[in-house]
Amino acid sequence: MLTRKMLVQGLPALWTERLVLRSLRQSDYSTLSELFSDPQVIRYVNRGSQPTPIRARRLLNQIRSSSAKLDSLHYGICWRGKEQVIGITSFQHWNDQNGTAQIGYILNRSCWGRGVATEAVQRLLQFGFEDLHLWRVEARCYEANVSSERVLSKIGMSYERSLPSFGLHDEDDEASESLMDVKVYSMYRE
């Protein structure tokens, strides 16, 4: 079992047939800034607020801060043999004491519809259950985020409940906010 103390030294790389999940590097942050500046990519992130350089920087700072404290474990998603990050998958709100975490992912639009999110998240779940000894992993997505729901179903997560009335900014009108349920999915260690 990997412990918090061991992870201070760095996250182990995780491999799949097509991908490498690796620790984020300082050199990744310009690519991530571009990723967080794409309105379609962050549509369901950060309550759907429109991307701006300030918001992108805020997201990057949140990632750095939570990574440094090991509150979250953020992995860059790369194609095998390539160094450029095409997305991120993470265990957020990681609690090693009670064996729980919330999984999240964000992917460059050019990689959508190619099974990348499914492959990356499956590998992260395997790492979580086998190496971190998690017993429960949760994922959340807005009800309108059908693609994310499909990923969660493909990896075997089960719908658990809905959390009502989360605010989501209208992408065409930043001042407008609609309320939308957030669906909660979960998976338990076998």
Image (tube, grey):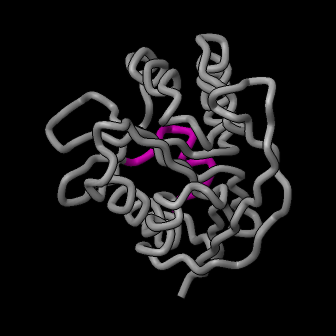
Viewer-nearest residue: 123 or 68: 123
Q: Main secondary structure of the magenta part?
A: loop
Q: Position of residue 186 (x, y in %)?
A: 63, 74
Q: Which one is in front, 116 or 71?
A: 116
Q: Position of residue 32 (x, y in %)?
A: 45, 24
In the rendered view, tell whether residue 146 sits above or below residue 82: below
At a point 52% along the width and 72% down the height, the residue shown is 129
- Does the magenta segment cover residue 43? no
Q: Position of residue 127 (x, y in %)?
A: 44, 64
**Residue, x 47% and y 79% (percent of image)?**
156
- Tell me: 131 left or right of 171: left
Q: Nearer the viewer, residue 126 or 40?
A: 40
Is residue 162 shown above or below 52?
Answer: below
Q: Residue 71: which quarter of the image?
A: top right
Q: Left or right? Give the position of 106 relative to 172.
A: left
Pick the front one: 165 or 89: 165
Residue 44 appears in which quarter of the rendering? top right
Is 79 rendered above or below residue 123? above
Q: Residue furthest bottom?
A: 190
Q: Using the rendered view, name the quadrant where residue 123 is placed.
A: bottom left
User: Residue 50, position in %: x, y?
Assistant: 64, 24
Does 6 appear in magenta? yes
Residue bounds of the magenta highlight: 1-12
**Residue placed at 38% from the left, 17% from the top?**
27
